[in-house]
Image (cartoon, rainbow, N blue to C red):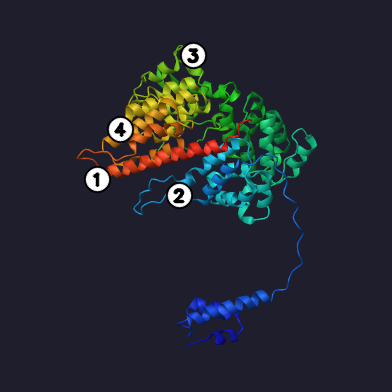
């Protein structure tokens, strides 16, 4: 058996590594002696290092003029960052205690709305949490502010914070033309992206002028990223630049420029697409294009269809999607959108689905509420009979175009007619907190599922969403549902206990959210 002295006598760290890799059995060694020797050698190696000259001391962290949250809110954040969650039973059940990690995004969002900065002592924990959860990063970096960026420059684990902003540095005053131009010409890519976004928000036309000056020298992937920033504040003033980008050597850049132009119903591209689309679709039926000519290619039409799609149907969908929706009223003799989408196809239903799907994409792209309503149809109608599409994902996109209140009322009517099983994606586009009719519809549907003895785990997704999105004022109304009720004989085994536990967790979470938001409210004036 080898001893510590035998291992250390060789004086070679590599010998220890070899013994550890091969195993002490093959090296005739004692595992305990190997570990002792490794400890001794580690101390030796560290003691043998020569001290290096100290590096320059970093500059002090910049000041952040924003106030810290009140004391109770700071303590709440510390508990949320600690990540303590409800104690499940180990059998897949979440238990009745709230999941604190799911409340952290709401705390960050509310703190940002109040204009707070992150407490200095909690900055490391906040950056660690954002490193582990990408969904937290935008709000966490904003709350961390300049001090968080200062820390991120000192710790490689937090470098993600530098990619979202101006690489850890401050942007110049947007009124300082020379400073803006210098950073645009000389800055790192992350700095330039942040600068272009800030300029676009401040003065949209100035961002286009800035981009035009270096456009021909930018890499294709950078041109695509910069072009995408023009979605914010898109207007007719951007048309000349976007029209020129239709001739770009990159196919992706051309396609993005065409998409942006088609979102401007008055653009020349929209007019060209309208002429092509109305030539294919009318009261007499649908005749898709016979070819994808050079003009269509320049205007962003992709020639090669995806697998399973016919060429002509693929081209037709792209033309209709890019045409301004206003062109169809004249084409169909003055009919409004609701009547247009209800029309039967003169040549049968073969093109109806393709046409309506393209109108759905156009309504979303052009943010047209009237067409979105027409394509959604009545909330009470079976989803498969919707005028536009039976796809819940497409209906969610159409809903996102409607005003907040109308969107919530439509989803509430949908839930009352069809229950919750089909509504998860639709609930995802509703403004939080769910108040009024929508909140009541969700609670009533959950209660109905409980009374019917349904499997509670089938509704776990909606229940989790309700914990984050229901108005905390609903907690009192839910209290009566927290006790186990008697179930029909054919109900799911053990469902009563599961439902009671789920409602207990929901009520506890809503009350915790209410307390959390109250703690973040600024102190009332004396």
Task: Please state which of residues 492 and 85 is positioned toward the viewer in this rendering.
Answer: 85
Q: Quadrant of residue 520?
A: top right
Which element is circle 2 on? Answer: loop
Which element is circle 3 on? Answer: helix
The nearer-to-camera label among 2 and 1 is 2
Q: Quadrant of residue 504?
A: top left
- Residue 243 in percent (x, y) is at 63, 29
Q: From the viewer's perspective, is residue 393 above or below residue 127?
A: above
Name the residue that disc number 2 marks: 85
Q: CA distance from mark 2 to mark 3?
A: 59 Å
The nearer-to-camera label among 2 and 3 is 2
The reply, left or right, for residue 380 in relation to residue 73 is left
Name the residue that disc number 4 marks: 448
Q: Residues within 10 Å of mark 2 (few under 14, many from 20)?
A: some
Q: CA distance from mark 2 to mark 1?
A: 27 Å
- Residue 494 in percent (x, y) is at 26, 46
Name the N-terminal-most of marks 2 and 1. 2
Q: CA distance from mark 1 to mark 4?
A: 17 Å
* Residues at circles 1 and 3 in contact by the CB criterion of under 8 Å: no
Name the N-terminal-most of marks 2 and 4. 2
């Amino acid at each position: 058996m080898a001893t510590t002295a035998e291992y250390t006598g060789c004086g070679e760290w590599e010998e220890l590594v070899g013994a550890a890799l091969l195993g002490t059995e093959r090296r005739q060694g004692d595992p305990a002696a190997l570990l002792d020797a490794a400890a001794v050698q580690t101390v030796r190696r560290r003691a043998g290092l020569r001290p290096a000259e100290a590096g320059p001391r970093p500059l002090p962290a910049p000041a952040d003029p924003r106030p810290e949250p009140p004391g109770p809110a700071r303590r709440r954040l510390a508990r949320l960052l600690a990540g303590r969650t409800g104690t499940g039973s180990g059998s897949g059940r979440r238990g009745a205690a709230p999941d604190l990690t799911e409340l952290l995004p709401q705390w960050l969002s509310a703190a940002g709305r109040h204009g707070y900065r992150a407490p200095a002592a909690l900055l490391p924990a906040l950056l660690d949490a954002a490193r582990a959860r990408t969904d937290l990063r935008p709000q966490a970096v904003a709350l961390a502010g300049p001090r968080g960026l200062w820390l991120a420059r000192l710790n490689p684990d937090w470098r993600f914070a530098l990619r979202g902003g101006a690489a850890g540095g401050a942007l110049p005053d947007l009124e300082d033309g020379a400073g803006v131009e210098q950073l645009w010409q000389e800055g790192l890519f992350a700095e330039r992206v942040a600068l272009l976004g800030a300029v676009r928000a401040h003065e949209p036309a100035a961002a286009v002028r800035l981009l035009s000056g270096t456009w021909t020298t930018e890499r294709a992937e950078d041109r695509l990223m910069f072009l995408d920033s023009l979605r914010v504040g898109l207007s007719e003033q951007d048309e000349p630049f976007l029209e020129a980008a239709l001739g770009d050597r990159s196919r992706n850049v051309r396609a993005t420029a065409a998409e942006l132009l088609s979102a401007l119903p008055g653009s020349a591209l929209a007019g060209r697409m309208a002429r092509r689309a109305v030539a294919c679709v009318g009261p007499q039926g649908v005749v898709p294009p016979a070819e994808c000519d050079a003009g269509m290619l320049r205007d962003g039409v992709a020639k090669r269809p995806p697998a399973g799609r016919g060429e002509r149907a693929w081209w037709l969908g792209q033309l209709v999607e890019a045409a301004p929706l206003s062109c169809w009223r004249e084409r169909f003799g003055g009919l409004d959108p609701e009547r247009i989408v209800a029309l039967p196809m003169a040549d049968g239903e073969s093109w109806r689905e393709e046409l309506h799907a393209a109108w759905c994409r156009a309504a979303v792209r052009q943010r047209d509420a009237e067409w979105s309503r027409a394509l959604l149809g009545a909330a009470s109608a079976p989803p498969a009979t919707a005028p536009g599409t039976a796809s819940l994902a497409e209906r969610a996109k159409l809903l996102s175009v409607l005003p907040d209140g109308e969107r919530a009322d439509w989803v509430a009517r949908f839930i009352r007619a069809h229950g919750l099983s089909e509504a998860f994606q639709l609930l995802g586009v509703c403004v939080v907190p769910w108040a009024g009719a929508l909140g009541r519809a969700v609670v009533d549907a959950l209660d109905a599922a409980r009374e019917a003895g349904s499997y509670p785990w089938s509704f776990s997704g909606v229940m989790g969403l309700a914990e984050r999105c229901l108005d905390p004022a609903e907690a009192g109304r839910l209290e009566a549902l927290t006790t186990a009720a008697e179930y029909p004989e054919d109900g799911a085994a053990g469902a009563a206990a599961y439902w009671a536990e789920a409602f207990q967790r929901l009520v506890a979470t809503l009350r915790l959210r209410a307390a959390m938001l109250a703690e973040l409210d600024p102190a009332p004036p004396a």
